Amino acid sequence: MTLPGLLAAYLTLFAAGFGIVMLLTRGTVLNLVECAGLSWLFGVGVVSLLLWLGGIFLSGLILQSFVALVCVALGIVAWRMQRSTSIQFSLPRPSNRVEWILASALAIELVIIFFVSLKHTLGWDGLFNWEIKARYAFLSSGVLPQSYYANPGRAFTHPEYPLAIPFTELWLYLWMGAPHQFWIKTIFPIFYIAGVLLLAIFVTRLSGKRWLGLLIALLVPFVPFVTASPGGVIVGYADIPLAVFYLTALGYLLCAGERDFFFYAAALTFIPWIKSEGIILWAILAGIGFVVAARQQRVRFFLLSILPGILLLAGWRIYLKAMHAITPSDFARPTFEILRGNLNRIGEICATAFAEISESSHWSIFWLLALVAVIYLLLSRNSSRLLLAIAVVAPVFLYLSTYIFSAWPSYTAHITSSLPRLLLHVMPAAWLAIGLALSLAKTKKSEPG
Amino acid sequence: MRFYLHLALWCALFAVFLFFSIPVVGPALLENKIGPIDPNHSTDSYLSGLTRVRNGTELFARVVETLPRDKSITVFVDAGSSSSEFLGMLVAYLSWPRDVQIIRVNPSTYSRELSAINASSVSDVIFCNLKPPVWIKNKTNFGSSITVVSAESLTPNQ
């Protein structure tokens, strides 16, 4: 039952995501690799949302059947759309020896990452923040009971964290018929693979050089924190998935075609649904999206595109309130008084952050590469590259500024424990910046990915 | 000229990047092996390391099954020991659906927190990497680091 169940869970998840991709695609050629990556991301988003919303009214087998039916329906819609519209699939092949070598090396590397990530246990947060919700929901007929949200003894599991990752794990549990800490680890390398392939596609599209996209994708796992530290792809945390959603929304925003804007909007919607910190990334991308939309005179379209995200954020807040969820105590409520009182922290925050980004066992010299890339982008006098530079730098500054309001007894301990994972959220976007900085060619947007 | 400078800069940066990365990433890729493909893969592994009990998830679930359902469980952890705190969280994780309360203690607060336990609402106290008071006779050890004590037996004169 376990393996067929796992397969069914993945098939329905991809079917749902594929349906969303096809609904958002507008009569164009669709790269199959891109389609697979997006199907995974949107499938995770849709299935977890359906389990949460469906769980308000349904439970048990009825809930599972309802979500499965919607997934299958979306898959059928996608299949029928593909037959009845002008959408065509393409699988771009490497065009020269260098691209073949890089593509082959990337394929081997992705297989290695997949197996390496299965070799480790779920990390501290992977178990206590994410899998715990999936397990408890499974043991409670697919719905997290109110007693979980309101139990102070389980406040350490962050009941207020959103449910995209745990409910994706729950979807696997429901199909496998039991919680299984080994098999749910498979979802994390899939996020990584989807993210790296989309990164390669974005670099290729924005630079016009496919070899560069492949090279950048190949270099990602050499950031030690991705593959060799708690927080990376190996421990089942939500940080890599969040980073992938951020990259996806940003990449499509920079590509800036009509279809791209739909994908931007969809990825943007799910960002705060992955992890609470996603609200900062959501706000930054919404701001950049506004600038892009204003330049293209599509502000109304932009406002519609951020609406689902706002509704999701508001809905989740209301739900937590209704569940009497324990309020998180990591940060004080921001006030001018606290800001004024804690301004003296800024020096220490910067010093601790500098110590972290220069920690070679975590990052090698990745952040130096990112800094050089940002300088390149700033000097390029190209507005889209300038926006990319902002998308790399702004989250880091905003994340650091939150520590002014840290309520931990030692705010430096708070920084040390959480900053590396926060930096991970920006890492793929920084690789995109590096890829574009490396490219001296002028921006080409219509190159096949 | 500008192109060659650009090329040289990025080649040098990538070379240094890989020079520092490979010694960290390489060994990390080789450590551990896949499996066991077990439903309690992670919790078993942690319990085995911290308590020396194999198949600990299932065995601890059996211990929890014997505790009264209508009362909560209090977990005592050493505030100065991250392994004790981790074990406490693991115990809370495995105690579902019972209500749990985790109390972080240090030598100066230990006795006070113990005496504040209310046996009418708490069924059992679980000590994680902490020695329970010596007067307690009726206790159940789970491996080397977890001790389960009925809340009623915490009163010294019993």
Image (cartoon, coloured by chain):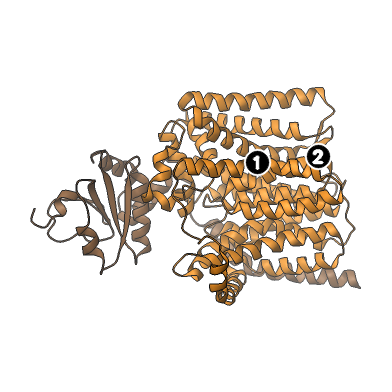
Give how far across and how far down residue A66 sits, in percent: 55, 24
Give how far across and how far down residue B140 sits, in percent: 19, 49
Q: Are marks 1 and 2 on the same chain?
A: yes
Q: Are marks 1 and 2 in contact (CB under 8 Å)?
A: no
| Chain given the colour brown | B
Label for residue A434? Answer: none
Residue at the spot 59% in from the left edge and 67% down from the top edge: B23
Element type at mark 1 = helix
A266, above or below A377, in the image: above
Residue at the spot 54% in from the left edge and 65% down from the top edge: A405
Give how far across and how far down residue A304 sits, in percent: 74, 40
* Displayed quadrant of residue B24: bottom right
Q: Which shade of the palette goes to chain A?
A: orange
Mark 1 or mark 2: name the one nearer the start of the chain.
1
Label for residue A259? Answer: 2
B86, above or below A10, in the image: below
Residue at the spot 55% in from the left edge and 62% down from the top edge: A334
Give how far across and how far down residue A143 sits, in percent: 46, 34
Looking at the rendered image, the quarter that the N terminus of chain B falls into is bottom right
| Residues packed near mark 2 inside 10 Å, few (<14), some (14 to 19) or many (20 plus) | some
Which amino acid, by three-letter code, is at mark 2?
A: Arg
Which residue is label 1 attached to?
A41
- Residue sitting nearer the eye, A277 or A357: A277
Which amino acid, by three-letter code, is at mark 1?
A: Leu
Element type at mark 2 = helix
The chain that hosts pointer 1 is A
Residue A181 visible in the displayed image: no
* Displayed quadrant of residue A303: top right
B15, above or below A92, in the image: below
In the picture provided, is B87 more to the left or to the right than A399?
A: left
